[in-house]
Image (cartoon, rainbow, N blue to C red):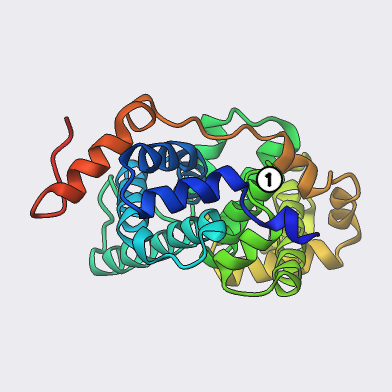
Amino acid sequence: MTQSEIEAPPDVTALVVRAQAGDREALDQLVAAHLPVIYNVVGRALGGHADVDDLVQDTMIKVMRGLPGLREPDRFRAWAVTIAYRQVQRHLRDRRRSLLRVRAAPAELPDPRADFADEAVSALALTGQRRELAQATRWLDDGDRRLLTLWWQEAAGELTRQEMASALRVNAKHAAVRLQRLRERLDAARGVVRALGAHPRCPELAGQLRGWNGATAPLWRKRLVRHTRDCARCTGHRGELVPVERLLLGAAALPVPVVPAERGQHRLQRILDSPHGRVSAA
């Protein structure tokens, strides 16, 4: 990858410089141009959860407030995506704490390990191996699921590898290693999904599933992955898996809602201008 491939286009850099100098029109253009990629990073991570719009708004507020202090205007997009990624991490961590405090989780706070796959299956109308891929994400831990959202954006051409690495706060080589490990864990989970959905199901696997309540707990993940790896019958299910990159490339991007797209930047500016840092939806 050349240096020109990892730098933001000159017009974006110019917009950043103008916005830092107080140009309101440049700020509006900058926000509007980057709202889709921020919305997709957050939306993929939360699986279309009701909190997506609020988290996108909070992310863009941080971006706008931090813009005057950005020392490298050509790194604006990587910097904004990093902020979005950290906001997602904080949000999911807070949600897990809430779930631990409340034994019976309320309806508005679904299991964060399941909502990505559930929403992806319905919202994106995935079929065949894309549906299996969405189901396989149930077996990933939160860190892998967040990494998958960035990988999805890279596959769609919205992020460069260097921008992904910046969001992860690692170098490009380390990011590639993390993606390779994610690919291996995801393929293992896809093998589990296929084995569980096989008709007839492997008798040995059926025996191991006695007492399983359907939860994608780490202990069950380890047990089922080990079985599908060592069982000659179940291993065959992984023989026709399409590479993950091809499945990600074919998945549609999340559409940006009309309200954020048309007037989101103006609401954000009103928020910044308000004494309490937030205004009601208008």
- Is 131 placed above or below 193 here? above
Q: Residue at x 51, y 48 (%)?
A: 14
- The count of marks equals 1
Q: Position of residue 247 (x, y in %)?
A: 75, 40
Rendering coords of residue 58 (x, y %): 30, 52
- Circle 1 packing at 10 Å, graded few (<14), some (14-19), many (20+), is many
Query: Residue at 61% across / 47% down in the picture?
Result: 10
Image coords of residue 266 (percent x, y): 26, 35
Observer able to see residue 91: no
Q: Amino acid at mark 1?
A: Leu
SS under mark 1:
helix
Along the line of sight, which residue is nearer the eye, 66 or 111?
66
Q: Position of residue 185 (x, y in %)?
A: 72, 64
In the image: residue 174, left or right of residue 142:
right
| In front of the other: 221 or 65 | 65
Which part of the image, by quadrant, shows the N terminus?
A: bottom right
| Residue 85 showing in the rendered view | yes
Question: Residue at (30%, 29%) from the top-left corner?
Answer: 263
80 and 186: which is toward the camera:
80
Name the residue at the left extreme: 275
Left or right position of 42 against 211:
left
- Identified at 80% across, 59% down, the residue is 2
Above or below for 55 versus 218:
above
Q: Which residue is mark 1?
A: 133
**Which quarter of the rendered picture does the C terminus lie within?**
top left
Which one is nearer the viewer's eye here, 222 or 210?
Answer: 222
